[in-house]
Each structure stands twice: as C-alpha cells, then as structure tokens.
Image (cartoon, helix red, strand yellow):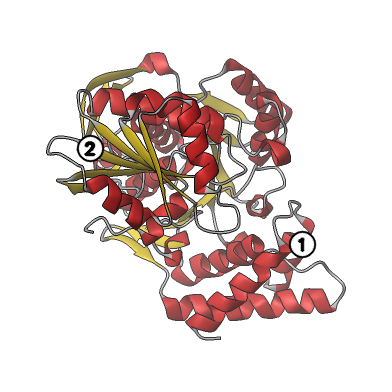
Amino acid sequence: MNYEEAGKYLKNIQSFGISLGLKRMKELCRRLKNPEKELSFIHVAGTNGKGSTAAYISSILAVGGYLTGRYVSPAVFRYEECIQYEDMRGVHYIDRELLAELVTEVSAAAEEMAHDGWEHPTVFEIETAVSFLAFVRWQCRIVLLEVGLGGREDATNVVEHVIASVITPISLDHTAVLGETLEKIAEEKAGIIKPEGLVITLQNDCRATAVIQKRADEENALMIVVRNEDITYISANLEGSVFSYKGENYRTSMPGRYQVSNACLAIETCRRLPKPFALDEEQIMLGIRMAQWRGRFEVVCPEPLVIIDGAHNPAGAEALLASVKELLSGRTLHGIMGVFKDKDYETMVKIVAPIFRDVVTVTAPGNRGLDAGLLAEEWKKNLCPEVATAKTVNEALKKVLSHYREGEAVLIFGSLSLFKELNWKV
C-alpha cells in the first residue's frame, strides 16, 4: 500500500466499530512476532489530562537523552500525530512512507486472522500494532502509551514491560461502555496496573483514589498519590504558569491551571522512574518548561485572540471555566462549540454558558457529531444572549469575527476533531 491506500484501508475497517477485549490484539501481536515485548512502557489512563501529562513526561525524558516513543489519540491536526517520537531535537511524527509500510504489514496479519476464523481486528487495534512496530523500528528506549478507552480491556493493555502506570483524574465519561458510576469507571482505568508495578495518580475525588488503591493492593503495586496540598500556584498568564511542587519551582509553557496538575503528575512520575531512567531535577524542570501539547487552551492567534480547547466532557468544561476566569477575566467572550452526540453536552453547556456573550454551534465531523441545531437549542435553554449555527468551524469563525472587537476573545471548544479543518486566519 501507498499512503493514500493505507488511509482508505483504515477508513474502511472503521466499520468494525469499537470492541473491547484483548484476545484479538494478543493474536495480532503474536502474528507480528510480538513487537511490544521488545519495548518498555509508561502506560497512561484517565478521563482528562492523559495527553498533556504524557507530553510533559515525554519532554522530560527527551531532555534526559532518552529516545521516547509516544502513541496518542485522537490526532488534532494531522493523522501522523498519533505515532511519534521525541528526542533532544524535538517531536517527530511518523512519516507517510513508514506508516504505509507498517499498515501493509499489519493488515496482512489482520486479514490472515479473519481468514482463519478470528474476528477482524478493529481500526484502533491495527493502529496500536502499527505503533509498536514503529517504536521498535526507531529503537525507542521507552514509550508513552495512552489508553484509547477505559484500560482493563483496551488494546494497549497487551503490553507487559510497564515501568509505570499513570492514572490522570477520572470523571464520568463513556458511561455506556465503562459504567455509570465513578467507581466502575475507576475500576476499568485501574485495570492497567501491573503486578508489583509502580502506580502514580492524581485524583480529585476520593472515591476514585480508593478504587485505584484497592487495585494496587491486589497487585502488590506501589501507589504514589500526587496531592493538591503539595502544589502552590504562583502566577499564570496565556504563556503558561509558575508553580511550586514539594518546594521546587517550575514554569510551564502550556496555559491553564489544570496544566499545573498535569505537570505535577509528570514530575512525580519522572522522579520515581527506576534505573536506568534516572533524571535529575534540572532535566525535569527544563522538560516541564519545553513541553507542548496542541489544542489545550492554546492561543492560535493573538489578535484577534483565538483560543482552542479540547473540553469535550463536564470535567473538561469545569477546567475550561477555571482557565477563563483566571486568564481572560474582564474580556467579552465569543464561543464556538461542537461535540459528539454521546457526550454529556447538556451539563457542559450549563457549566460554561454564563461566561459567553454569544455562541455559534457546529456539527462535529463524523457520524458521532451532534447536530448543530440541537446543540444550539441547549444554549438557548441556558439563556445565552445570542445563539447561531454554522455548517463548519471556519464559517462559525467568520460569523464571530464579523462583530469581534479589539480586546475580546474567541474560544473554540468541544471535540478535538473541530481543529483539523480550522483556519484561524479567515
């Protein structure tokens, strides 16, 4: 396959949908000679903050001289973001030629499975296997591996050589699949914990902490909890934050108070890594300052001020609200929102509605996108002064900028899929 053919293949097998369970993934890896067994992993699960926390850890490891692979989902601006590595020169996405080559290799194994009577692997399983092969090809010393959905039965949970399991804050999301209570969701996320392993977590709800601790005890794993009382906020602006964690001062380049919590989780993880991944405090500080992660309260244009944020569930909306109050206080805000229909958009709108002067809704790309008209009705229920709809995020941006005034701000938020087609220079 060439790149275009590989893309068509991956799009076609999306019809197999999402199907949790490890049997297919284990068989697929076996037929590929188990590339995952040649790698060491930091496995990252959680509801919010996985991407940012992994970005901080990857940056720190790269500063320390370790070639670090990273598997993320979903991509924000281009598909190749999903499989990347980072070294002292920066972040590098998988190139199209290698991607096509590895998709060809994995697809052959997948088709053999189907021929032999197995269920065909899902697109996420195919992509995960491709990432393993890429990381082996690059000779990555360590890999940051983000869970796709849940944890216990997620395709990424086939890995064995896990030096740390990191669990970011857990909240209600994907309840139809993972369970309708925080405890049930936490049980699924805690399923990544390995026997006698290392677990680092930060939770905002003691119920989630208790579930993770129970699982860690069952696996005889060491659990480290990052506590909010060890974090001191010093200053913050749209260029990042200055904070203290356990007496040491750090600076981030990613704005938003919630990024400080993500950074502290990364700091604690890197402090606890076993040999040979020893990192000194200067490397950790520099890695925190250099880390970047697109689409998280990111300023994409300074004037007119346009900010994008991947808040796609109530917990994300709460974090967005806190960031706005801290960093955009006194500004008139114009909103553009698009989400998937399986998200709790009603609660999201209730949380952020008071801060916007006007909102334009769009239908998020793909079959999961919530109709813009239905989303607009939800905003009207919450008494937003002006509500309109648009066919695309760029059309919405044109509408908003037509009455934008200097000193105001435009906030585009919801599904990360919105940002792929965004042109903030229109």
379 lies above or below 11 = above
Q: Position of residue 371 (x, y in %)?
A: 55, 48
Among the two numbered marks 2 and 1 on one chain, the one whose residue lies closer to the N terminus: 1
The residue lying at 70 percent from left, 66 percent from top is 15
The residue that disc 1 covers is 24
Label for residue 409?
Answer: 2
In the structure shown, which secondary structural element does the residue marked by tag 2 occupy? strand
- The quarter holding residue 36 reads bottom right
What is the quadrant of the N terminus in the image? bottom right
Calculate the distance from the C-alpha at mark 2 to the C-alpha at mark 1: 47 Å
What is the quadrant of the C terminus in the image? bottom left
In the picture as drawn, the residue positioned furthest to the left comes out as: 406
393 lies above or below 384 = below
The residue lying at 46 percent from left, 54 percent from top is 417
Asked whether residue 169 appears in the rendered view, the answer is no
Q: Position of residue 387 (x, y in %)?
A: 39, 37
Viewer-side residue, 299 vs 214: 299
